[in-house]
Image (cartoon, rainbow, N blue to C red):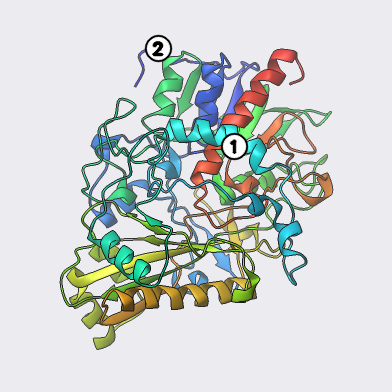
Amino acid sequence: MADNIAKFGHDDASVVVVVGTGSGGGVLANELAQRGVKVVALEAGGRYLPEDYINDEWDSFAQLSWGDMRTTSGDWRVARDFANLPAWIVKAVGGTSIHWAGASLRFQEHEFKAASTYGAVDGASLLDWPITLAELEPYYDLAEKKLGVTRTNDLPGLPGNNNYLVLEKGAKAMGYSKVSTGRMAINSVDNDDRMACQQTGFCFQGCKWGAKWSAAYTDIPRGEATGNLEVRDHSHATRIEHDEDGKITGVRYIDKDGAEQFQRARIVAVAGNSIESPRLLLASASERFPDGLANSSGQVGRNYMRHTTGSVYAIFERPVRMWRGTTMAGIVQDEAHHDPARGFVGGYELETLALGIPFMAAFMDPGGWGREFTSAMDSYENMAGMWIVGEDLPQETNRITLNRSEKDRFGLPVPNVHYDDHPNDIAMRNHAYGVGERIYRAAGATRILPTPPYPSTHNLGTNRMSENPRDGVVNKWGQAHDIPNLFVSDGSVFTTSAAENPTLTIVALAIRQAEHIAAEMEKGAL
């Protein structure tokens, strides 16, 4: 941690307040600080560094995960299996950049134009992004350099572990060609003052080597080192305030001692993820904004997306020991394109995934028991696994609302997460299950274990970008259509979900947004 950490007064109305310190908020805070902008970052969780991470699934889950009460509704299986855990995300400085597996993929050009490309799809609220791939490419370049993404900037790919080699064998036997250890924000060689990956696994529990990029130990301390960033951990934002003209004036929050504080602000950027960000905007309703902040369109909280997911595990005659090496060790991208002849629009990735025994027992078949379940667990050493990551379609009815009948420890309404699978999601998931099974059969599997979706790790939409204010919440800069000095800086601004893991895009958008905010502040426009 830097020695010259800034301390700003609660009455300092010149600061930018960033709510959340993950891949969006943490990067934004640093990028602004590097440009000389004073920033106060509010983080609801505590502060942990690599020496604090725990290489044990459940102990780490208790340390890092956002375990606050939430409720669920809809037909998704998560609402039945994990009713109060719709999302598996981190509550800590660095956010879910601690927990993520490192996959860093650019969106494809057509995915920024989903409405134009896919046409009208019944039940879907498709919309083209207000930005294009060409506009974002310079920021993808910067993001890849910041994260140290393998197979970019002359950085070699990571080595393939057994889990990858099994995937590669089966995929190539089927004729797939876009098969590799992927583009990963995990050091394949010493880079950026961080050591190379030691292949010990536990990527979801925080990288004890610091080889995997995380805002917790890169962007945050570097921002603090400028003297322009103050991070206040254990600070839970409860409400954003505004003046009689509707201009944002600051953020109310509960500090680590349980006392309510108010931080004045020139600008507020909300980066609490796709559940907490709309929750905060909705909870900040006032006489002037009775439906919540930035919600004249009625779109705050709507179009929640989580990717079309599921897993396929397979048992082989010989040991695979999938847990050795990176958690996500390889990818097949041949199905990521758009081809409606398959029976759905959009595409999906197949990515190796290894769960430790505790999580495997919890997630393989929630509620499962008997010989069918125990025999699978008995074969854990011989198991290989992959995860489906596909584009799910925005639906206005999939949304975050305030559940006023359930209160959190501060006495505030908890968020309810409602999600129904679109028929397109179901068709894509079934197609991917079939491909996953054929890949593993081609590699010699003796038994296939399709696994239902886990609690969401890719939480997207709910404050989407739009060209027209009636269609969304923020413009192409993540700036609220209704309130010029209010921004959103996380995956909730995604207009559509694309097939790719979202973190690289979140980081690229945050870099671009910081550039814009700093320039507008310099001009006096903000």
Q: Tell me what residue is drawn at x 30 percent, y 75 percent.
A: 314
Badge 2 crowding class, 10 Å Cα cut-off, few under 14, some 14 to 19, many 20 or more, is few
Q: Circles 2 and 1: CB distance less than 8 Å? A: no
Q: State the residue in front, 65 or 430.
A: 430
Q: In the displayed structure, would residue 154 be above or below residue 326?
A: above
Calculate the distance from the C-alpha at mark 2 to the C-alpha at mark 1.
Answer: 34 Å
- Which quarter of the rendered picture does the N terminus lie within? top left
Q: State the residue in front, 212 or 71.
A: 212
Where residue 492 sits in the image (x, y, percent)?
A: 61, 48
The image quadrant that residue 497 belongs to is: bottom right
Let me know if residue 285 appears in the view.
yes
Amino acid type, mark 1: Glu
Where residue 463 sits in the image (x, y, percent)?
A: 68, 48
Left or right? Give the position of 225 relative to 295.
left
Mark 2 falls on what kind of element?
loop
- Which quarter of the rendered picture does the C terminus lie within? top right
The image quadrant that residue 434 belongs to is: bottom left
- Residue 4 badge: 2
Q: Tell me what residue is drawn at x 48 percent, y 32 percent.
A: 255
**Badge nearest the viewer, 2 or 1:** 1
Amino acid type, mark 2: Asn
The answer to which of marks 2 and 1 sits earlier in the sequence is 2
Q: In the displayed structure, would residue 196 be above or below residue 350?
A: above
Which residue is tagged 1?
A: 137
Left or right? Give the position of 435 relative to 484.
left
Q: Residue furthest bottom?
A: 371
Let me know if residue 265 appears in the view.
no
Where residue 406 sits in the image (x, y, percent)?
A: 57, 59
Q: Tell me what residue is drawn at x 69 percent, y 34 percent.
A: 477
